[in-house]
């Protein structure tokens, strides 16, 4: 019966084949974050805050790299629809070059100006000291992060999603083991505390990328490129990459900086507030990660259809993805509210901190369906046609026009509790959803980037 359903529904079978491995990897990663928080949580509030704030700058880097990965996926998904292997390699090469330039900038800032970076988030000298060490060690793993992002984008866009999933799961399990050994000083090694979790992360990323790249070249997966293939870039092709990548890059960077502004708001409210918010991050990642596969599948499947000029089918897929994400996230949000109290009992923290964390989890659950819908519409559907300017305008307006001002006003003028500050700054998500749906139904984002002239892709369009 199940096999018949899958045969009759190409949408369902393809969506699950892409979404499930991506979501599993994201869920494992989120589970690791919970384990990390439990381990670091045994070291006290300063350690929790240091790791939380020390992770914010690397997160900006990762989000920025994800923009490069998104550009790569947009192009490769459409070229894969036409089985154009030459331009798949060129898409990878051009975006990889941009990624290396970004990695160099973030590496210098993290290794040389770490104290100044942490000083933007908090005035607590102890937290700055602990967080700076964490940031420096993390920076060593920036190159592996770049390579993992790029090769995973190629594999997923060509519907080879299992390899990055297995490599990611290996990394997660290895990171958990190394965290336990290095944080608490097991098997004769010194107790390293906060530095231990940074070393564990860096070592794990290096091993993960080594396994991923080795498997790609040994088994001849898409992505086993030669240097000649990825460096064969014409001026027009570079322009096409820039036109698609620039709005995403600006979008993700300023969105990440906006998230950093939120962290500054929390950090200036106090160390306890930072610790409480930090404890919710793994659950937020778990919740979003559960539906990340749907967003990735939306971009790939709709991009394939657009590359084949099957616009009507692409739009039908768009509606199905939105409905799926909306229903699933609403159900998960209800479950999160019901079980939020069970999460906080695993931490060695005060009752006040537990109460605050529960309130934040409930607020997050209330807006989860909006966040997931925005992720699918903005991150998957609207970008699949290469019209990345739409998500740039949408996210810039939401984050900087509504979210950031609302955060500062509610925290420092009205001096509201952190849970209400979080809810009010999250109001920008609702505005983005309304505008995003209008854009989706306008169909202006639907385009075939494999055929259109570069002049039709200009950002100023």
Image (cartoon, grey):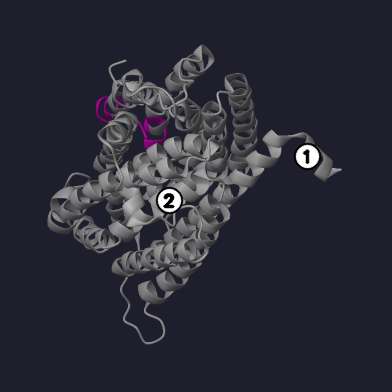
**Callout 1 environment at 10 Å: few (<14), some (14 to 19), or many (20+)?**
few
Q: Is residue 201 above or below residue 49?
A: below
Does any portion of residue 124 appear in the rendered image? no
Report the side of 337 relative to 105 (left or right): right
Region of the chain picked out in magenta, as a range: 408-421
How far from the left and from the top, in percent, is residue 292? 52, 41
Magenta span: chief secondary structure? helix
Residue at (17, 58) in percent of width and height? 111
Q: Residue furthest bottom?
A: 188
Is 428 on the left-hand or right-hand side of 234?
right
Q: Which residue is mark 2?
A: 279
User: CA separation, marks 1 and 2?
Assistant: 43 Å
In this image, 215 relative to 413: left or right? right
Residue 157: x percent and y percent?
50, 43
Q: Position of residue 424 (x, y in %)?
A: 39, 26
For the residue pair 282 and 424, the one nearer the viewer reads as: 282
Residue 5 figure quarter: top right
The N terminus lies in which quarter of the figure? top right
Tell me, yes or no, whether the highlighted magenta stretch contains residue 13. no
Residue 198's x, y, as percent? 32, 64
Label 1 sits on residue: 7
Ranked by sequence position, the earlier of labels 1 and 2 is: 1
Q: What element does badge 2 sit on?
A: helix
Measured along the vertical axis of the image, is residue 278 above or below residue 304? below
- Between circles 1 and 2, the one closer to the viewer is 1
Q: Is residue 341 above or below residue 313?
A: below
Q: Residue at x 25, y 40 (%)?
A: 264
């Amino acid at each position: 019966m199940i096999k018949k359903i899958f045969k009759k529904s190409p949408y369902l079978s393809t969506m699950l084949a892409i979404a499930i491995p991506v979501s599993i990897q994201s869920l494992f990663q989120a589970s690791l974050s919970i384990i990390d928080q439990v381990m670091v949580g045994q070291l006290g509030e300063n350690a929790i805050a240091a790791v939380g704030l020390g992770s914010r700058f690397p997160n900006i880097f990762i989000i920025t790299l994800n923009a490069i990965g998104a550009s790569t996926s947009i192009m490769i998904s459409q070229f894969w629809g036409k089985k154009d292997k030459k331009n798949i390699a060129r898409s990878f090469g051009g975006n990889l070059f941009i990624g290396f330039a970004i990695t160099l900038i973030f590496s210098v800032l993290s290794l040389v100006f770490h104290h100044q970076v942490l000083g933007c988030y908090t005035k607590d000298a102890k937290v700055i000291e602990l967080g700076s060490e964490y940031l420096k060690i993390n920076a060593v793993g920036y190159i592996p992060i770049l390579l993992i992002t790029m090769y995973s984008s190629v594999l997923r866009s060509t519907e080879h999603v299992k390899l990055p999933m297995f490599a990611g799961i290996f990394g997660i399990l290895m990171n958990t083991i190394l965290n336990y050994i290095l944080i608490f000083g097991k098997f004769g090694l010194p107790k390293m505390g906060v530095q231990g979790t940074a070393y564990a992360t860096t070592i794990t990323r290096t091993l993960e990328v080594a396994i991923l790249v080795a498997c790609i070249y040994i088994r001849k997966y898409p992505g086993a490129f030669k240097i000649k293939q990825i460096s064969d870039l014409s001026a027009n092709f570079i322009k096409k990459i820039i036109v698609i990548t620039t709005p995403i890059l600006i979008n993700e960077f300023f969105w990440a900086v906006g998230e950093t502004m939120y962290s500054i708001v929390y950090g200036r409210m106090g160390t306890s507030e930072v610790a409480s918010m930090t404890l919710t991050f793994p659950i937020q990642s778990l919740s979003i990660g559960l539906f990340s596969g749907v967003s990735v599948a939306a971009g790939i499947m709709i991009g394939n259809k657009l590359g084949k000029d099957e616009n009507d089918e692409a739009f039908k897929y768009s509606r199905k993805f939105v409905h799926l994400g909306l229903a699933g996230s609403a159900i998960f949000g209800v479950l999160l509210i019901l079980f939020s109290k069970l999460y906080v009992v695993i931490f060695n923290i005060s009752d006040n901190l537990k109460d605050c964390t529960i309130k934040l989890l409930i607020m997050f659950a209330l807006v989860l369906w909006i966040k997931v819908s925005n992720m699918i519409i903005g991150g998957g559907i609207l970008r699949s046609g290469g019209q990345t300017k739409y998500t740039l305008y949408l996210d810039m307006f939401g984050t900087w026009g509504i979210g950031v001002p609302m955060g500062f006003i509610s925290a420092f003028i009205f001096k509201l509790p952190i849970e209400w500050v979080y809810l009010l700054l999250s109001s920008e998500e609702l505005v983005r959803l309304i505008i995003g749906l209008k854009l989706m139904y306008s169909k202006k984002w639907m385009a075939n980037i494999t055929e259109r002239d570069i002049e039709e892709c200009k950002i100023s369009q």
